[in-house]
Image: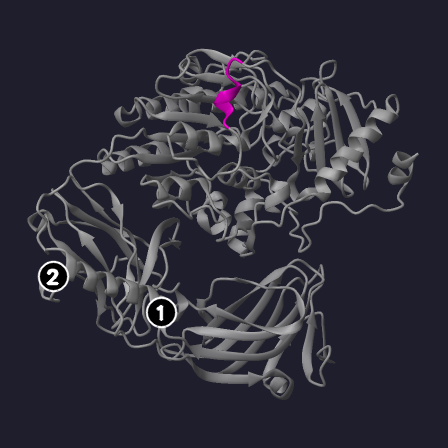
Amino acid sequence: MLRGLVIALFVVTLTACSKPELDGVEPQRFERLDLDGVLDSPALGSETVIDHFDIPTDVTNWEVESPARRFAKIPGTDKRTLLVRASADEPNIVLERKGEFDLATFNSVRLAYTFQGLGWASIAFFRDGKLVHRSPSAYLVRGDVPAPINIPLEMGGKTGICDTMQVVFGGKSHRAVRVVTIETLYIPPGALLPSPDGPPLAFALGHASRLAQRVVTDRPIEAMVEVGGGAELRFSYGRTFEPLGGDDATLLLSLLDFDGKVLMQESFRAPLEATTWASERVDLSEYAGRNLTVRFSLRGPEQAWVVGEVALWGEAAESRPNVLFITSDTHRADHIGVAEDGVGVSTPHIDALAAEGVLFLDCIAPSNVTNPSHISMMTGIPPRDTGIVVNRLRLSEGARTLAETFAEAGYVTMAALGTAHLGHNGSGLGQGFDRMNWPPRVPRDAVEIIDMTEAWLDDAEGQPLFVWVHVFDAHWPYVPPGTFDRSYYDKDIDPFDPSLPDPGVPNDELPSDMQGLRDLDFPRAQYKGEVSYLDDQLGRLLGFEQLENAIIALTSDHGEGLGESGVYFEHAELYPGSLRVPMMIRWPDGPRGVKVAEPITNYDVGHTLAELAGLSAPDFPGRDLTELVGSEPTEPERYTISSSGHSASLEVGDDYLILHLVEHDSPHSVRAFVSHQVELFDLAADPECLVDLVDEKPERARELRTQLIAWLEDAGPGLRGDANESPEFLAQLAALGYVDQEVEEDVSFWEDDDCEWCRRMRR
């Protein structure tokens, strides 16, 4: 409550030194409110254990479904525990107990366990053989020492007596779980949410996150405000789950003067759906020129809600440029109309954007996979140093993001995303965004994303904006809508006609929807159609009045292999098709129609946008790419690292070396690699990387390999948060072709050994 005390002292000082009524009313700028707990609020209640099961002594009352079970000692202790194992044939472990479980009395289950493997646990309750409720899945942490984990049940108002409880462990095969205790608990609702005595944090309800704080029954949160002319208080609110027993609370908004007198009070009911946000606006113009306290509280049964996007809006804001950051997922550099090595795709709106600004002719992504690459762009830090190389790892809360940089500078920050795994629950990138929205399951069409952005722009009403728009249409499967379908392919030809020549590519190297394909030009043409369609939608976005004079950057997280380098319709491996991406930036009074040949990596885009927006000495990693305009191109070293850390690469001039860090073969690729294998290519003579020169130029290969290993060994401390291992999230990734992305606890990417390739490179 120290921060609450600071506010109280501020109030006392302001009362003694200032008049409650201000002499003049200045135009109100956008101002986020950082609310704190009221000093005299009671403490949260303590948790209550409803049932406790000591598994070693109580195991006879449990049914255990597992390929193997036995009692084993806990390492380093004299205690015994139940050890259960899974197998490839039986991947799930189920512990089931009969009894009386009153769902109105507890809201969480705590396990004490040790775990080896990669997996999750969930809790289910049954009545008369029928499922009543299943909890969300909780990611299990590896370790040899018993660790507790609380699994919130999120029962959504379900009540009644159940006769069976199941504890289910799932995930990767060959897991070993030692179960020590199982407890059902009642945990005060507020304890399940972040503390109110801290800055707003990205909090997800359903498939949308907002910068939010906790408010608990009988524990209000509040902030002092100076109300300007035409002021309006805006906020969002919601609850994470329905209360036990179904009774609901009411959110109260109160406005108090210096003496604590309530000047205004309004009440708000919970949204009809448990995990959704509701938004409100409250006119404060009649209080213009006064210092007041804004207070949120809950009235009714004990609950905890979240209140987000709490800000004071007014008649005018400081004139600052809006900033739009567009990432077109899976978009190759040669698939824009103005590309010098273009393929004849029509992208008039992207071309016009490039003509109004600077086009970077040689840009690569730092990785070949969505979340690691976006996290790199949003932090200015390469995946080697974030330690995030798979889609399942979230960014740590301690990381500083581009959105936070703009938010701290007074910008309203918004993100409209095209795929679920890039949302805050999957990536951790919601931090710093006032609002972020992503699809609940299947990817969104560009038209939905642009429609959402348009509505948000209207909400902003002249306040400075940082908006991230992510479109996913170019990603497989290639199914362009409407007139864009087969716009680059003869509609009278059946590309699956068995009478057509054999393409020479095994079916198992092609995506699932291309089994039996005879003409490889068909998916290439459909990919073009997707790019033209998203360009059409981006034309709507770029035409919005609020973005007329905005700073705009467009790039991609990675490319796509369209058959080059043996990669078929997938962004596998680190060949140019998977890494080279578009990059263009337009800004007010900037150069027009300029092309920059300097090789760049797009994680510098964040620093560049901050500089262009005039943020004073932006403390954000990277360099200002606009400084390359008019400069002579050089041959910088460019490094990348692949999905799961399977490979790393180094490009210097035309020399391109790939070092395969582990044995692997990628889906939809005809090539397979052994651990520490090296490939060397001449990009000028062989842009598709078909001719390996490692035998022809062994000394150059050794030189670049040594340099690449030194880079790998110089990795930063990492910005890894937790991993999302829920079955639903993994199923979403699998549906998009992301499979077998291992999450290693050790962030180290290189370990020298005495393998054949290491001996060969040491000669």
Please identify the residue farthest to the front as the structure is shown. Answer: 17
Q: Nearer the viewer, residue 654 or 526?
A: 654
| Image side of residue 616 versus residue 754, left or right | left
Q: Is residue 339 above or below residue 467?
A: above
Give the residue at x 88% y 21%: 696
Is 627 in the magenta?
A: yes
Is 67 in the magenta?
A: no
Q: Nearer the viewer, mark 2 or mark 1?
A: 2
Q: Is residue 34 above or below residue 25?
A: below
Measured from the top left, where is residue 28 in percent x and y? Answer: 18, 42
Residue 540: in sight, yes or no? yes
Check disc 1 and report the residue beneath it. 190
Instruction: Locate the C terminus by quadrant.
Output: top right
Here the colouring is one colour
Which element is circle 2 on?
Answer: loop
Name the quadrant containing residue 373: top right
| Image side of residue 144 versus residue 547, left or right | right
Highlighted magenta segment, given as a residue range: 624-630
Disc sitting over residue 257 in the figure: 2
Measured from the top left, where is residue 642 in percent x and y? Answer: 66, 38
Q: Nearer the viewer, residue 457 or 91?
A: 457
Name the quadrant containing residue 244: bottom left
Count all numbered tags in the image, as a single digit.
2
| Amino acid type for the residue under numbered disc 1 | Gly
Disc sitting over residue 544 in the figure: none
Q: Nearer the viewer, residue 384 or 479?
A: 384
Residue 562: in sight, yes or no? no
Name the quadrant containing residue 368: top right
